[in-house]
Amino acid sequence: MSARVQKLLKEYPSMVRERTCLAHQIAHFRGITAEEVIESMYTPLMDGERVQTSGTSNKTAQIALNYQERMERINREWYEQIEKELQSVNDEIVFLESAMASLSGKCAAVLHDMVVNRLSWNELAEKHYVSRSMIAKYRKKAIVEVERLYSKRDADTLRFILG
């Protein structure tokens, strides 16, 4: 059986939680403040030994001119990174859910109840009126079918990239 698909099925609940957290981060994104940017930019300039006699340094003037631009760039890059992570997790969840939904026979319903609804094997057997060994057979067959769909997706992606 496919270790990749088994891992995805096991990690499905945590992927859904991660998607929820990332969506919440985007919805409530504030970024860093101007003060945090200024503090990060204001580090002593070590050009060697010298005694500073003036109250303002070149570094202070540079910070004053550049902090807004830097703050906007940092916040934009941070937001874009969260968006990329959300898109990646969401794509994986959507593909896995569609792969599970497209399974043949009772495999789709059994795997959905197992992975999404997180029913125990006893609950699955009772709900679907089959034995635990039949649940195991459905699970094994479902994993093989889902692995075929992932392999096809991988092949299509590779063909697109190379072609």
Image (tube, grey):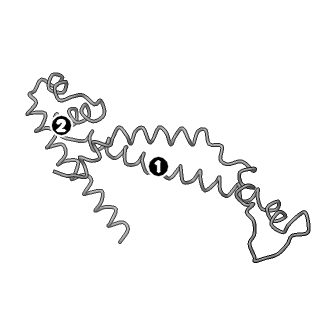
Residue 163 seen: no
| Secondary element at image label 1 | helix
Q: Nearer the viewer, residue 47 or 133?
A: 47
Q: Earlier in the sequence, mark 1 or mark 2?
A: 1
Name the residue carrying label 2: 107
Name the residue carrying label 1: 87
Mark 1 surroundings within 10 Å by alpha-carbon count, few (fewer than 14), some (14 through 19), many (20 or more): some
Quadrant including the C terminus: bottom left
| Secondary element at image label 2 | helix
The spot of residue 126 in percent (x, y) is 15, 22
The spot of residue 11 in percent (x, y) is 32, 43
Mark 2 surroundings within 10 Å by alpha-carbon count, few (fewer than 14), some (14 through 19), many (20 or more): many
Q: Dividing the picture into quarters, in which one does residue 135 lie?
A: top left
The spot of residue 45 in percent (x, y) is 75, 69
The spot of residue 111 in percent (x, y) is 22, 36
Please report the residue visible at 24 percent of the width from the left and 28 percent of the height from the top: 119
Residue 162 seen: yes
- What type is the residue that disc 1 sits on? Gln
- What type is the residue that disc 2 sits on? Cys
Residue 18 located left or right of residue 142: right
Q: Which mark is residue 12?
A: none
Residue 163 located left or right of residue 49: left
